[in-house]
């Protein structure tokens, strides 16, 4: 259970999805805890191997989402 929690936190750390305090705690844990350090190195390697691409929706898709949002409120 702890490994799964650590893995999820490290993934959030890599994607900068942690609140500021948790981000600092994760940095400290990566530096001082062997379990965190191991998970970080393993996941950082996988993260680095992923292609860096961005997808942009077509304008008509964005327009449709905005129209639906207005109708739903």
Image (cartoon, rainbow, N blue to C red):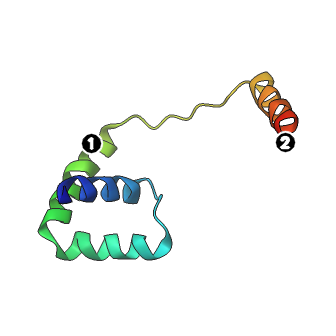
Side (left or right) of 46 relative to 35: right
Task: Check disc 1: other Cα within 10 Å, few if <14, some if 14-19, many if 20+.
Answer: few
Q: What secondary structure is marked by label 1?
A: helix
User: Measuring 31% from the left and 58% from the top, which residue is drawn there?
Assistant: 10
Q: What secondary structure is marked by label 2?
A: loop
Residue 65 disc label:
none
Residue 37 placement (x, y as % from top left): 18, 64
The disc, 1 or 2, on the residue closer to the chain's N-terminal end is 1
Q: Which residue is mark 1?
A: 46
Camera-side mark, 1 or 2: 2
Residue 3 placement (x, y as % from top left): 18, 56
Inter-mark Cα distance, 1 to 2: 41 Å
User: Measuring 20% from the left and 64% from the top, which residue is drawn there?
Assistant: 36
Q: Which residue is mark 2?
A: 73
Q: How many marks?
A: 2
User: Which of the pair 16/49 is nearer the observer?
Assistant: 16
User: Measuring 41% from the left and 70% from the top, which residue is drawn there?
Assistant: 23
Residue 62 placement (x, y as % from top left): 77, 30
The vertical placement of 5 against 24, above or below, is above
User: Measuring 82% from the left and 36% from the top, which residue is drawn there?
Assistant: 72
Placement of the N terminus among the 4 image quadrants: bottom left
Side (left or right) of 8 relative to 19: left
User: Which of the pair 43/72 is nearer the observer?
Assistant: 72
The vertical placement of 42 against 17, above or below, is above
Placement of the C terminus among the 4 image quadrants: top right
Question: Which residue in the rendered view is the most extreme toward the left?
Answer: 34
């Amino acid at each position: 259970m702890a490994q799964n929690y650590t893995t999820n936190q490290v993934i959030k750390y890599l994607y900068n999805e942690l609140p500021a305090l948790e981000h600092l705690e994760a940095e400290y844990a990566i530096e001082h805890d062997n379990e965190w350090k191991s998970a970080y190195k393993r996941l950082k390697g996988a993260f680095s191997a992923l292609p860096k691409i961005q997808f942009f929706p077509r304008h008509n898709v964005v327009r449709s989402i905005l129209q639906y949002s207005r109708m739903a409120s």
